[in-house]
Amino acid sequence: MSDFSEKKIKAVEKEGGKKGQDLAGMSEMGLCFQQANLVEPCGHMELMEMAFAAMNKEVDPEAEERRGGAGEVAKILLSADIDRFCAIIHVPEQFTSAEKNDRQYEISAIDWAKAAFATLPGDGKGVEFTVETPTLVKAVYTKDPDAGRYPEKAKDNVSGASFGWLRSKQLVLDDDSDSDEMVFGDDDMPGI
């Protein structure tokens, strides 16, 4: 039985489902590796797991509001409050081996997590990996002022390090990419 109210769980599932729809939409535009900050879980792993499940849920085509659909999107999810920070890194099986995908990606959730958590503030320690597989990593970081560990600061560091690692692997676009090469619509595509 959960220690959280039904209202809180609904809010977490709603945020997860909506964020999943956003990630799925970005994936359809070619961005297969993404990161998202979630507010409602407030750094609680149990709530993050609920949001993650709602995010990856199959989309019901008959539903009034589309939610979920991000099961095939590689992602790092971050949530923090003043006392704790947690993250879930998910890499779908097809991206763990170059032979399994058209883009020849060979990415491990473990490698992504190690890169993301490499620049923790304070003493640089304090993260506990509760799950570590090539497709899924779950991490928890707890406040310890004596060691200089502050969850909200850690979340910012992990987010920056994660994005830097994704960029180094050319899995996200550089901020300074040449916009002349971007295609915006049918008028930009010869022969259509």
Image: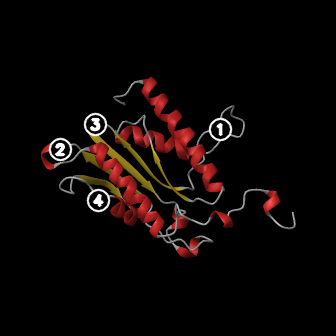
Q: Which residue is mark 1?
A: 66
Nearest to N terminus: mark 3 or mark 1 = 1
Residue contact at pointers 4 and 1, CB within 8 angstroms: no
Mark 2 = which residue? 144
Q: How many marks?
A: 4
Which one is closest to the eye, mark 4 or mark 1?
Answer: 4
* Eye-nearest disc, 3 or 1: 3
The answer to whether mark 3 and mark 1 are in CB contact below 8 A is: no
* Place of residue 71 in the rendered image (x, y in percent of width and height, measured from the top left): 56, 52
Q: What residue did someone put label 3 on?
A: 82
**Contact check, label 4 and label 2, Cβ < 8 Å:** no
Calculate the distance from the C-alpha at mark 4 to the C-alpha at mark 2.
Answer: 16 Å
- Residue 81 position within the rendered picture, expressed as x and y whole percent measured from the top left: 32, 37
102 above or below 192? below
How packed mark 1 is, by other alpha carbons closer than 10 Å (few <14, some 14-19, many 20 or more), is some
Instruction: Please tell me which residue is depicted at 53% across the width and 71% down the height of the picture.
Output: 105
Determine the CA span between mark 3 and mark 1. Answer: 32 Å
Q: Going 42% across and 65% down the picture, which residue do you hit?
A: 165
Give the spatial CA distance, label 4 vs label 1.
Answer: 37 Å
Amino acid type, residue under disc 4 in the picture: Thr
Quarter of the figure with the N terminus: top left
State left or right for residue 35 relative to residue 69. Answer: left
Disc 2 marks a residue whose amino acid type is: Asp
Residue, disc 4 = 119
Dot 4 or dot 2: first in sequence order is: 4
Residue 63: quadrant of the picture: top right
